[in-house]
Amino acid sequence: MIIISMGLLKISMGLLKATGGAARPWSVVMLLALLVAGCAADTRLRHPQTSGATPPSPPAATTPPNRTVIKIATQSPLSGGQAALGQALKLGAQLAIETQAAQMQAVGFSVELVPFDDEAKPAIGVSNARKVVNDEDILLLIGHLNSGVAIPASEVYRQLKLQ
C-alpha cells in the first residue's frame, strides 16, 4: 500500500505543478485516495518469500492461497451526471498502478484495478461494497466519491470490522 500511496502523491504533485494549480480537483481526489490508502492496513497480504508470519484466519472456513495478484478496487460514479469525477478517481488509481507496476513485479506481485460504478446511488454503492468485501483478492478500496454513497456503504465495511 505504501508504494501505491507514494505513486498517488507523486501524480498529485506532478499534476499540480504541470497545470499551475488548475488541476486542484484532481489533486484533491488523489490526495483523499492517498489518505484512504495510508490509513488502511490489511494484514492479509504476506509475500511468501519475505514474511514468515502466519496470516490471520479469514472469516471464511478456508485459508486463502499465497497471493501474487493484488486487486485494488475503486468505487465511484462511472456513469451519469458525475461520471467525469468518478472517471478521474478511477484513472488516478490506474495511473498509480501503472507507474508502480515494475516495482511490484520485481517483488513478485501483479496489481489489477477493479473499478465499481456506483452511479452515485446509495443502493448500488452498498451492493458494490458487498462485492468488494466478498472478493478476498481485493486488498484496497479507493473511494467513495459521494458521502451519500459512502455512509451507507461504510455500514457494510463496519459489519466486517474493516474500518
Image (spheres, helix red, strand yellow):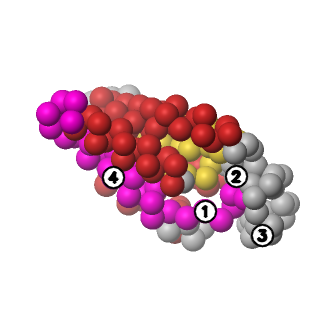
Q: Nearer the viewer, residue 90 or 109?
A: 109
What secondary structure is marked by label 2?
loop
Q: On the image, which quarter does residue 84 sit in?
A: top left
Above or below, comparing residue 110 to residue 161 in the picture: above
Residue ID for mark 1 = 42
Q: Is residue 80 left or right of residue 103?
A: left
State the mark number for residue 53. Answer: 3
Q: Amino acid at mark 4?
A: Leu
Q: Earlier in the sequence, mark 3 or mark 4?
A: 4
**Gap between marks 1 and 2 measured at Cα:** 11 Å
Residue ID for mark 2 = 136
Q: Amino acid at mark 1?
A: Asp
Pointer 2 local density, CA inside 10 Å: few below 14, some 14–19, many at least 20: some
**Gap between marks 2 and 4 measured at Cα:** 24 Å
Is 28 within the magenta?
yes
Residue ID for mark 4 = 32
Q: Position of residue 114 (x, y in %)?
A: 56, 37
Q: Is residue 85 left or right of residue 135?
A: left
**Gap between marks 4 and 1 measured at Cα:** 18 Å
Question: What is the span of residues highlighted in magenta in the rendered image?
Answer: 17-46
Q: Amino acid at mark 2?
A: Glu
What secondary structure is marked by label 4?
helix
Q: Residue at x 36, y 47 (%)?
A: 9
Q: Nearer the viewer, mark 3 or mark 2?
A: 3
Above or below, comparing residue 124 to residue 160 in the picture: above
